[in-house]
Amino acid sequence: MKIGVFDSGIGGLSVANAIEKALPQAEVIFVTDKANFPYATKSPEQIWQGIIPIFEGLIEQQVDVIVVACNTVSTTLSGHLRDRFPIIPLVALDPMVKPAALETKSGIIAVCATPTTLASQRYADLKQEFASDITVLEPDCSDWSYLIENNQMNEAKIQKDIAPALEAGADVVVLACTHYHWIENEIKELSAGRAQVMQPESTIVEQVKRVLGL
Ligand code: DGL
């Protein structure tokens, strides 16, 4: 059993690690698009050309499923990818707006994501469907993926960017970019006693299992 995992950079590695841990019998092939990193503010059109050969490469290696371990691509291009590669099942990510809306007691959630994810129609649809009666704050995380990829992120920067949402009463923080999984512990510490932090790795693992009939 072969599982392809794709992201622009090391965000997808946290997802690949979670899949490997849950499915040790599987061969996980992790691929990135370093040439076009970061996707953060790129348009879907700018991202599209670079990912085609990467997906073709995974299909050539006969993977059984491809996990799009990137919210930016999932929210903007997963439909196009399914049309272009109908031969391969794709697991794509949705920002966890629905579970966060179900969990919040204060009626305020914070969604941390790239500008391109926040601008996507998919994200707008999720907000409209599941969060029309709550307040959704969107901290400026536009440089986070770059800083995390280059090991330049630090706690003061995270605190500066996330504190306003916590002070405004957000009691759920959604990590809707896989790069941010690498700073989950720091965000949890900063949010302790105020907000819970959500990221989708366990959901992704369940989806992969379902697709593979496990
Ligand atoms: N890790 C990706 C995401 O989940 C992309 C980050 C980037 O390339 O800026 O959105």
Image (cartoon, rainbow, N blue to C red):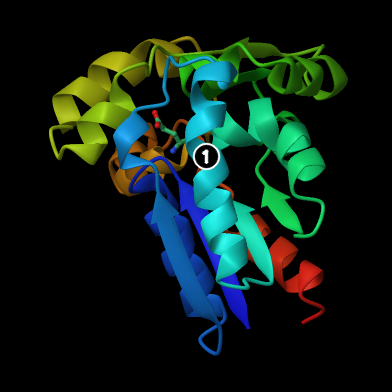
* Residue placed under numbered mark 1 in the picture: 51
Q: Taking 7 as reference, is 176 above or below it?
A: above
Name the residue at 63% across, 59% down: 66
Residue 35 seen = yes
Residue 170 pos. (x, y %):
53, 20
User: Can you say which quadrant of the picture contains the N terminus?
Assistant: bottom right
Would you say the beta carbon of the disc 1 residue lies within 8 angstroms of ligand 1? no
Looking at the image, residue 200 sits to the left or right of residue 89; the answer is left
In the picture, measured across the screen, residue 164 lies left or right of residue 62, that is left
Ligand 1 found in image quarter: top left
Residue sitting at x 44%, y 51%? 12
Q: Residues within 10 Å of mark 1 (few under 14, many from 20)?
A: some
Could you tell me which secondary element the residue under label 1 belongs to? helix
Q: Answer with the quarter of the image where residue 78 lies.
A: top right
Closest to the observer, 180 or 10 = 10
User: Residue 111: where, in percent of width, then height?
Assistant: 54, 23
Residue 197, placed above or below residue 194: below
Residue 172 can be seen, yes or no:
no
Image quarter of the C terminus = bottom right
Residue ID at (67%, 30%): 77
Q: In this orientation, which residue lies closer to the viewer: 45 or 7?
A: 45
Question: Considering depth in this image, is 186 or 78 the residue closer to the camera?
Answer: 78
- Give amino acid for label 1: Ile
- In the image, 130 versus 50, the foreground residue is 50
- Does residue 66 lie above or below 155 as drawn? below
Residue 146 in picture, x, y percent from top left: 26, 28
As drawn, the residue found furthest toward the right would be: 129
